[in-house]
Image (cartoon, grey):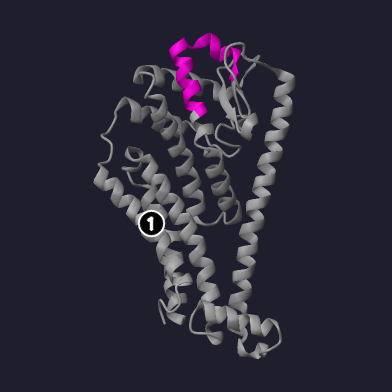
Amino acid sequence: MVWTSWFLAVMAVALAWPVPVFLSRARWTSRAPFAAMVLWQAIALAGGLSMIGAMLCYGLVPLGGNLVEGLHGLLRVALGQESLDTLGIPHAFALSAAALLSAHLTFTLWLTYFRINRQRRRHRELLILLSSPSDDRPATLVINHEAPVAYCLPGGSRSVTVLSDGLMALLSPDELRAVLLHEETHLAQRHHLLLWAFAAWRSALPWLPTSRLAQRAVSSLIEILADDVALRSVSKTTLVTAIALVASGSAHVPATSLVGGGAERIDTPATTSARLGRLLTPAPALGRAQQALVLTAAALVMAAPTALLLVPGTLP
């Protein structure tokens, strides 16, 4: 199991730095946003699993030849059936580090969920005071604001899309439809759950390139996915105009109000510029074979640490 721990350690390092840096610079991701999203998720999950697994496997080396045997041995130590001296200080330290990292990640995930829910609850309370229901659009609230603003507020059956008077006065009916389709896609595809997970990942390990680059990439990819859905019903010109007009209003409201797919959605000028550039100078979508290759790579990235940890005797 020593070789397993070393293999997982090397994989953890690779997924923490060179792989996410390389992927963040790739130009094909906007041509296959779904496949790129899956790959980013696989990198984040496999990276975390490899970090914890490397320390866990190394810590269990004196107790068994694979993870199952090692955990049985650890249980015997915990029950007093075997001496704690069997572990030794380095292995005990590795087990403690694995336990602390697991607890840290779990607690940060819960804390981020609690913080985002609290922000949304306060935001919803403000909307009750400052908005009114749309007369002709279900689950849509209208706020009295001159700036062109549009976003959605997730909340299960209470999810709503928020529009400003300024936006409705500025946009044509088709442009407004494009905006609504975009925001409704965020809700329908549960983008806020993705953003919650990656926001928690960054909060837990802010020094890790994976967490920072992944959050930025995922935020951009969900905007592209929502744009693609809107393009099925409106023209490219209509969508481009709508994006530009909505972006012009983002500077007039607090950043925390633009909660689109979730409280951690990042609508930056760079993201808007990338969306507009993709629509104005479109590149052909990645071929099916190439997308299948990306999805296969994502599956292999996830399968490697999972197999090493769960299949007894995968490596000595």
Q: In the image, residue 110 lies at what x, y percent?
A: 66, 51
- Identify the image quadrant of residue 77: bottom right
Q: The disc labelled 1 sits on which kind of residue?
A: Ala
Quick one: quadrant of the C terminus?
A: bottom left
Q: Position of residue 119 (x, y in %)?
A: 69, 37
How many numbered marks appear? Answer: 1
Counting from the top left corner in percent of width and height, residue 260 is at 56, 31
Q: Say which residue appears at 61% left-offset and 64% top-offset.
A: 102
Query: Which residue corresponds to mark 1?
Result: 299
Considering depth in this image, is 100 or 74 the residue closer to the camera? 74
Q: Position of residue 133 (x, y in %)?
A: 65, 16
Q: Residue at x 35, y 51 (%)?
A: 295
Left or right, 275 with respect to 111, comes to: left
| Residue 114 as seen in the image, left or right of residue 258 | right
Q: Is residue 203 above or below residue 285?
A: below
Q: Tag 1's secondary structure?
A: helix
Figure check: 59 above or below 86: above
Mark 1 Cα-neighbour bin, 10 Å: few <14, some 14–19, many ≥20 = some
Q: Return the residue nearer the eye: 20 or 155.
A: 155
Residue 92 quadrant: bottom right
**Residue 209 versus residue 116 in the image, above or below:** below
Q: Is residue 180 magenta?
A: yes
Q: Could you tell me what secondary structure mostly forms the magenta stretch?
A: helix
Magenta-drawn stretch contains 19: no
Magenta part of the protein: which range? 163-184
Which residue shows up at 55% across the image and 74% down it? 56
Above or below, 67 against 138 in this view is: below
